[in-house]
Amino acid sequence: MGEDEQALQVLIQRINDLVVVLDWIKRDLDEIVKVLKQKVGVPTPTLSPTPPAPAVPSPSAESPPRGEIKRIDDIRMMFPKELEDLLTFEEEQNYIVIKPRQYLGHENFAKVASIVRGAGGEYISAGKESHFRIPREESK
């Protein structure tokens, strides 16, 4: 495979990873709209079924109690060993920043994103500086 073909493959994979994240956002927004419409009494239209989320193993440890400041060790324990080895963890003032050591691929990206989202975190798309981040303290 030539350099151009490899570059295209990487771009295609990155787009696929973003599609997974956008699908999660769409599902969350659909759920929020449904709840809001129920609260105001607006009938909800029947939507086409959303495909099931990718199977992701549950985190190996629970999130720290609400309001407690999270530490890197708390966050590391949420990841299975095979995923933890693919990531670096950095502590910043307000966030724990998680960066991949290498290209994660679609499946591992989805697993990491699910765990991060479950801990109240998010994915920051910034080209080569893209990363996940989890707030150190949950809002009460």
Image: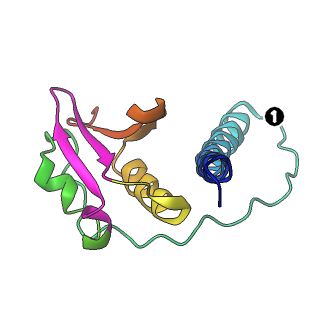
- Asked if residue 124 lies left or right of residue 93, the reply is right
Residue at (47, 70) in percent of width and height: 56
- Asked if residue 57 lies left or right of residue 44, the reply is left
Count of all numbered marks drawn on residues in the image: 1
Kindly state the secondary structure of the residue where label 1 is placed: loop
Q: What residue type is labelled 1?
A: Val
Q: Is residue 117 above or below residue 53?
A: above
Which quarter shows the C terminus? Answer: top left
Q: Is residue 118 above or below residue 80?
A: above
Residue 57 location in percent, x, y?
Answer: 41, 73
Q: In which quarter of the image is residue 62?
A: bottom left
- Asked if residue 78 lies left or right of residue 30, the reply is left
Residue 90 location in percent, x, y?
Answer: 18, 40
Q: In this view, does 129 lie above or below 100?
A: above
Q: Is residue 84 magenta?
A: yes
Residue 17 location in percent, x, y?
Answer: 59, 51
- Asked if residue 11 lies left or right of residue 83, the reply is right
Residue at (65, 61) in percent of width and height: 1
Residue 2 location in percent, x, y?
Answer: 65, 54
Q: In which quarter of the image is residue 39?
A: top right
Near mark 1 (Cα within 10 A), the count class, few <14, some 14-19 or many ≥20, is few
Q: In this view, does 51 lie above or below 135?
A: below
For this orientation, the residue located farthest to the front is 2
Q: Does the magenta stretch include residue 20?
A: no
From the viewer's side, name the closer residue of 97 and 70. Answer: 97
- The colour scheme applied to this rendered structure is rainbow
Residue ID for mark 1: 42
Residue at (81, 34) in percent of width and height: 42
From the viewer's side, name the closer residue of 49 and 100. Answer: 100
Q: What stretch is highlighted in magenta?
A: 83-101
